[in-house]
Amino acid sequence: MSENKYYIYINGSKIAVSKELYDYDRQSERKITYAEVDRKTERFKADQDKLKAEFIPSL
């Protein structure tokens, strides 16, 4: 049975890594995306019961 291969890119080079390292890399990228993009997105919070909408500005 062949083992699944996991790859990450470092300086444009495709490197084969273990699943643990691959998962760690993906989690790190997601944390960076959250800090750079998600937190900086303006949002609306709606309360249907009170018929109220609140604007939440970006950080």
Image: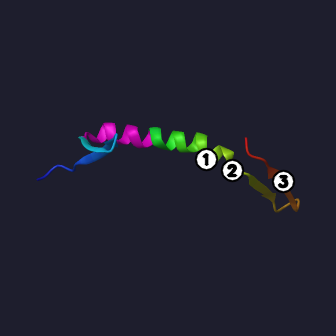
Q: Secondary structure at mark 1?
A: loop
Say if mark 1 contacts mark 2, CB within 8 Å: yes
Type of amino acid at the residue the image marks with label 3 = Glu
Residue that carries the numbered disc 1 in the rendered image: 37
Q: Nearer the viewer, residue 46 or 56?
A: 56
Residue at x-position 84% and y-position 61%:
49
Q: Secondary structure at mark 2?
A: loop
Task: Return the mark for residue 59.
Answer: none
User: Is 23 positioned to the left or the right of 32 in the image?
Assistant: left
Residue at x-position 73% and y-position 51%:
42
User: Is 50 positioned to the left or the right of 27 in the image?
Assistant: right
Earlier along the polypeptide chain: callout 2 or callout 3? 2
Q: Quadrant of residue 59?
A: top right
Residue at x-position 27% and y-position 47%:
6
Q: Nearer the viewer, residue 26 or 52?
A: 26
| Badge nearest the viewer, 2 or 3 | 2
Dominant secondary structure of the residues highlighted in magenta in the image = helix
Residue that carries the numbered disc 2 in the rendered image: 41
Residue at x-position 62% and y-position 47%:
38
Residue that carries the numbered disc 3 in the rendered image: 54
Type of amino acid at the residue the image marks with label 1 = Val
Q: Quadrant of residue 20?
A: top left
